[in-house]
Image: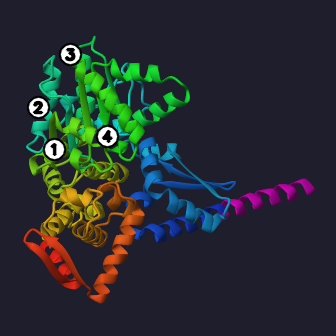
């Protein structure tokens, strides 16, 4: 009789624990919905995940590894905070595949993404784009992920693409160095890696080296510390083609700049090709030696512009095909019409659509796309861009945009730079660090000081004077601000 009573007590305790866990999970769901909003909760969590709580561990069950990564990267902080609020500060969170959900959701769209990556395995053409964004350098014997045959060519990048093809087709390049520059996410890295990949295919005996400027700097410092400078120089200077990404990283590093200058001279004298990429024109990169700038502009400097509508549509189309998911043309047109800045924004929109369709088991339609991508479009494509602001400010004060990026501190340039930073902080969603970096590698403190100074001048409506093209000019701070904002709009 006593054993039966003990068994009943244990059974009753288990029932209480189960009910307690269920109520805790329900409370966590409510807390997540409160933190991320009902609409996002309905889209990403309500019918697409299964939460289980046991021994201080909250498991968020999903249908495949890709969705687990997606939810973890976008909502891990909110889920963890909700779990700690309900289950205590020691509660841990993990995102994992739930077999029960997998039985109910078997979308084919993500089959290739759910499999572990294998070295050398073939991926869908544009699927290589996302994977290789994390790979910023590669030794000569390693296969790169990007190739020229997956590069979408349009009016904005046709010259850059043809220059890349010329480097590969001609044994003696007609221009050295080849310098690509343009904003982020416009295809500079794709071209650099594509050239190396094509060279490997067409001239197997040729040696090439692709690396970021950061890697170059780090390896140079390491070679100095370990007294292996000769080996480092030999590796750099004996390649037939050297491709350096993000060359602007060498700014304010005089010793590394000097080493790169000597390496470039050695390669150039030997008739070997150098290809560089930067987010700015060589003359707009501050704190780079004049010797290097002269080398950069002695070859071919090509700017890659933002893709036009037709090119943006083709990028969306190819990226959707790589995911084996049909996206209607009207949806592709809608995305391309609203997102202009760079390729990554377009890919992010397609990725979000495909993820939503997979989670909800629905077909992609124009109405669904407009609802799901409303926030994405609003955040990705601001009404005013930094380049627009710099152009307007430079014209108003009678200088060039390059002067705003320079280290000059005369009254006119400083005034223009301060207003440019102030307007960028006011009219874009960029942080102070981003504004500083894109305004000539200035630090965030410089941006904050500039903004504070302009705010004080506006509050006092101070009288400002500067030297314009027609002579000395004088105007009130509020009048200047009104004219600049009116032109920008």
Disc on the earlier residue, 1 or 4 = 4
Residue 303, horizontal then vertical, whole percent: 16, 44
Regarding mark 1 in the picture, which secondary structure is present there? strand
Q: Nearer the viewer, residue 80 or 52?
A: 80
Q: Would you say residue 47 sits in the magenta stretch? A: no
Residue 238, labelled with which disc?
Answer: none
Q: Label for residue 247?
A: 4
Q: Are marks 3 and 4 in contact (CB under 8 Å)?
A: no
> Callout 4 environment at 10 Å: few (<14), some (14 to 19), or many (20+)?
many
Q: Residue at x 21, y 19 (%)?
A: 271
Q: Residues within 10 Å of mark 3 (few under 14, many from 20)?
A: few
> Label 3, label 2: how many angstroms apart (C-alpha)?
17 Å
Label 1 crowd bin: few (<14), some (14–19), many (20+), radius 10 Å = many
**Span shown in magenta:** 1-20
Element type at mark 4: helix
Looking at the rendered image, the quarter that the C terminus falls into is bottom left
Q: Depth-wise, is mark 1 or mark 2 nearer the camera?
A: 1
Q: Which residue does the numbered mark 3 point to in the structure image? A: 202
- Which comes sooner in the sequence, label 3 or label 4? 3
Residue 161 seen from this side: yes
Left or right of residue 92, residue 433 in this image: left
Q: Earlier in the sequence, mark 4 or mark 2?
A: 2
Residue 158 vertical placement versus 169 (above, below): below
Q: Residues at badges 4 and 2 in contact (C-beta under 8 Å)? A: no
Near-viewer residue (112 or 475): 475
Mark 2 sits on what residue?
Answer: 162
**Quadrant placement of the N terminus:** bottom right
């Amino acid at each position: 009789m006593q054993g039966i009573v003990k068994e009943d007590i244990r059974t009753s305790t288990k029932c209480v624990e189960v009910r307690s866990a269920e109520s805790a999970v329900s409370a966590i769901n409510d807390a997540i919905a409160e933190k991320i909003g009902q609409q996002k909760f309905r889209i990403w969590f309500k019918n697409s995940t299964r939460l289980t709580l046991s021994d201080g561990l909250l498991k968020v069950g999903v249908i495949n590894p890709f969705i687990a990564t997606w939810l973890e990267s976008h909502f891990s902080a909110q889920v963890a905070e909700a779990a700690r609020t309900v289950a205590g500060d020691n509660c841990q969170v993990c995102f994992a595949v739930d077999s029960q959900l997998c039985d109910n959701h078997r979308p084919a769209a993500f089959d290739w993404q759910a499999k572990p990556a294998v070295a050398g395995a073939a991926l869908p053409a544009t699927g290589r784009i996302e994977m290789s964004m994390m790979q910023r350098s590669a030794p000569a014997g390693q296969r790169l992920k990007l190739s020229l045959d997956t590069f979408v060519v349009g009016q904005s990048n046709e010259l850059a693409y043809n220059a890349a093809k010329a480097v590969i087709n001609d044994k003696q390049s007609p221009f050295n160095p080849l310098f690509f520059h343009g904003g982020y996410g416009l295809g500079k890295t794709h071209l650099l890696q594509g050239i190396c990949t094509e060279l490997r295919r067409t001239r197997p005996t040729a040696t090439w080296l692709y690396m970021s400027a950061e890697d170059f700097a780090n390896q140079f410092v390491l070679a100095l510390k370990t007294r292996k400078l000769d080996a480092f120089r030999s590796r750099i200077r004996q390649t037939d083609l050297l491709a350096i990404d993000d060359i602007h990283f060498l700014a304010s590093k005089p010793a590394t700049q000097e080493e790169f200058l000597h390496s470039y001279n050695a390669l150039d004298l030997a008739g070997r090709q150098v290809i560089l990429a930067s987010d700015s024109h060589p003359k707009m990169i501050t704190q780079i030696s004049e010797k290097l700038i002269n080398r950069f502009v002695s070859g071919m400097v090509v700017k890659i512009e933002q893709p036009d509508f037709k090119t943006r549509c083709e990028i969306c189309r190819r990226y959707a095909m790589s995911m084996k998911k049909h996206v209607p043309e009207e949806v592709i047109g809608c995305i391309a019409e609203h997102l202009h800045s760079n390729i990554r924004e377009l890919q992010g929109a397609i990725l979000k659509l495909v993820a939503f369709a997979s989670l909800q088991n629905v077909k992609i339609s124009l109405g669904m796309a407009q609802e799901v991508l409303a926030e994405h479009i609003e955040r990705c494509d601001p009404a005013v861009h930094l380049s627009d602001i710099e152009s307007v400010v430079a014209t108003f004060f009678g200088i060039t945009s390059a002067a705003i990026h320079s280290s000059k501190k005369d009254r006119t340039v400083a005034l223009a730079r301060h207003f440019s930073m102030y307007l960028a902080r006011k009219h874009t969603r960029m942080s102070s660090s981003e504004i500083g970096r894109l305004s000539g590698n200035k630090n965030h403190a410089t941006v904050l000081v500039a903004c504070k100074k302009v705010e004080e001048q506006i509050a006092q409506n101070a009288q400002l004077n500067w030297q314009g093209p027609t002579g000395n000019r004088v105007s009130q701070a509020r009048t200047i601000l009104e004219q600049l904002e009116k032109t920008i709009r």
